[in-house]
Image (cartoon, rainbow, N blue to C red):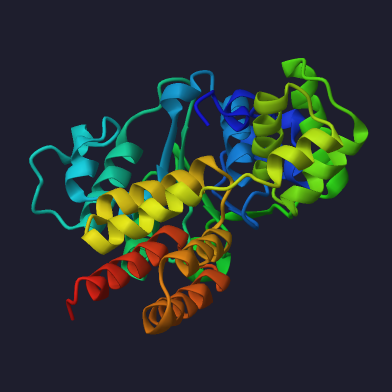
Amino acid sequence: MDAPLWTDEHSPSLDDLPQSSVRDRLRRAVDEPMNLVVQGPPGAGKTAAVRALAETAHADPANDLVEINVADFFGRTKKELREDPRFEQFLAGRSRMAKRDMINRVLKESASYAPVSGEYKTIVLDNAEAIREDFQQALRRVMERYHRTTQFVIVTRQPSTLIAPIRSRCFPVPVRAPTTDEIEAVVEGILEAEDVPYDDDGLEFVAGYAEGDLRRAILGAQTTAEQADEVTMSTVHETLRDVGHDDDLESILAAAESGDLTDARKTVGTLLDDEGYDGQSLLADLLSVARKRYDGEELARLHRLAGDVDHDLVTGTDDRLHLAHLLATWGARAEGRP
């Protein structure tokens, strides 16, 4: 999808968040910059809610909101991190630093800067599942040191993985999966703003296709609008029944086989971030494509590896890391490495 994503173009304001309990809890954090754990299933709107909070709380959110995607950070090479414009000022000349020390430095340095506007800034740690305990201990110390000028927001599907000292310093903000009515209302508002014709059956079909994932619903509606110029039951069915990413999935397997894990990880990241996938659905589609590519014992080995990864995904650990581990293990076996 080359056009700007509607999930970015139509990000909600704090008042537009569909869940009243989330709105109320986040409003409390505007004037009183308490630390937060925003928790809920994939596609529930957690990150959008945090950005809405920052837009309301900061006169200059472009500078006073710092977002660190933990999964993306650990899923990239050290060279990629040092060259990232967001991090290069902190990591220049530190090629021998371990990744955990790199993220600790980025976190500490980001927290140490004074806010550009107002009395505090917000640091968001997104996709914070399965953060190692040593990093959490470092995070706790940074939270204690800079609590007067920095609000920390941890976004996660699995708050139980956080150590007790972190949880005790944060106010919980549960975000449940949106209802069908809530999904339809959000998609309808976006279609009105985009001046795209639609009908009630089209909205209902999009909401059913999303299966409780608001991001998936919005991107499904955008795909339909771009291909059919309207969102009706017939156009949604015609468009989304054939929506797939077999070429991307094939490229992931091919890259893993050749040992090009950087390309494989980048494609996985794109599917997770831009195409509405969660880890389990991506794994399922990857196996579906693999069944056309492999057979016999080779396919059986891949399924056994995938079974271990699926268990980790179910328990809420990091999608990128576990899918990357699957690809690295599969690539090593494909090349005959131990």
- Image coordinates of residue 82 in percent, x first then y, are 19, 40
Count numbered badges in the picture.
Answer: 0
**Picture quadrant where residue 106 is located:** top left
**Residue at 74% from the left image edge and 36% from the top image edge:** 17
| 252 to 130, vertically: above or below | above
In this image, 109 relative to 66: left or right? left
Q: Do we see residue 303 in this rendering?
A: yes
Q: Residue furthest right?
A: 200
**Picture quadrant where residue 14 is located:** top right
State which quarter of the image contains the C terminus.
bottom left
**Residue at 83% from the left image edge and 43% from the top image edge:** 205
- Image coordinates of residue 270 in percent, x first then y, are 44, 43
- Image coordinates of residue 264 in percent, x first then y, are 33, 53
Q: Do we see residue 143 in this rendering?
A: no
**Residue at 57% from the left image edge and 72% from the top image edge:** 314
- Image coordinates of residue 8 in percent, x first then y, are 57, 29
**Residue at 37% from the left image edge and 49% from the top image edge:** 72
Q: Which residue is more in the foreground, 131 or 147?
A: 131
| 5 to 241, vertically: above or below | above
